[in-house]
Image: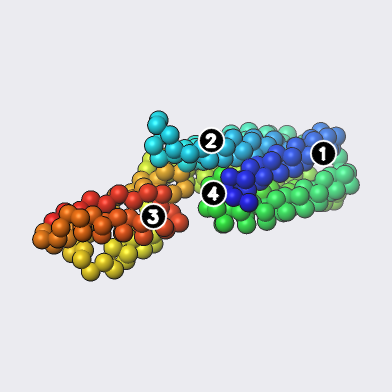
Amino acid sequence: MNRYDSVKKAGILGILGNIFLLIIKTIVAFLSHSQAMIADAANSAGDIFASLMTFIGNKISSEPYDKTHNFGHGKAEYIFSLFISISMIFVAVKLLYDSVLSLINRDAFTFSWFLVLVCIITIIVKFFLYLYTKTMSKKYNNILLEANMKDHRNDCIVTLCTLISVFCGLFGFYLFDGIVGIGISIWVAYTGISILVESCNILMDISIDIDTEKMILDLAHSYKDIKKIDPISSAPVGYQYMVVLTIYVDGSMSTFDSHNLADSLENDITKLDKVYRTIIHVNPI
């Protein structure tokens, strides 16, 4: 299974799983009036949007380069992950507002074993989705999968907190329900902001990471005919980078030999996982 198909599958699984969870959470939440479960249901609605953005963003980013997009459509991953992060922050603000009102008004909810069952089902479904997206995220270095993976992980923790608040309600500690709702909103907001920052960094053309830059320089220094290397310039094109490098060779070297050297180095650098294309300029010294 290739990168595109794996992300597509993760998006579809996320949509189906979250629709199922949204339905059962919404029914139980409004029957019991649990603020924590209402917050959890709203979070599942946001998860459906996130999975849909993953599906669409992956489809666009998988398109090859063309005359109007010479370096491909890879940045679509980060544009759609930006949408996911904004939706997370929006949901978090709404949940925070509702939870604070719940505390002020001292709202109580009706305990039900269905609340417990829904929490357990949610944790199981989300845990398996988390394991799948984590494996695929590491394999393909895809920010859309990473965003979904963090979302599924957060949901496991969030629903565990909801489960605790449900049992607190059984013993009459209803305030904990609103407190958990506030905690959920803060957690969702934090995750949304972290994805937002990462997406903006790529869209603002952040440079390649230090470790990959060192690998590039080590490759260049392995060529004994290269006498000097200028600082590396790089720009992201999706999850990979365009790398521009200026090298200096002996002025007496023929144009043919210097260009052969540059071509060989370009091929070596472009084999690195994070490099999309390499452009090398040769100067005499």
Residue 35 in percent (x, y) is at: 75, 38
Mark 4 sits on what residue?
142
Residue 259 higher or lower than 68, as above or below = below
Q: CA distance from mark 1 to mark 2?
A: 32 Å
| Residue identifier under label 1 | 24
Q: Quadrant of residue 25?
A: top right
Give the structural element (helix, strand or loop) at label 1.
Answer: helix
- Kindly identify the residue that appears in the image at 26 percent across and 57 percent down: 260
Mark 2 touches mark 4? (CB < 8 Å): no
Task: Measure how far apart labels 2 and 3 are at the Cα level.
Answer: 23 Å
Image label count: 4
Residue wearing tag 3:
270
Determine crowd level at label 2: few under 14, some 14-19, many 20+ residues with C-alpha closer than 10 A: some
Closer-to-camera residue (157/59): 59
Of 52 and 276, nearer the camera is 276
Q: Earlier in the sequence, mark 2 or mark 4?
A: 2
Residue at image position (34%, 60%) is: 216
Tell me how far mark 4 sits from mark 3, CA to CA: 19 Å
Is 88 situated left or right of 35 in this image? left
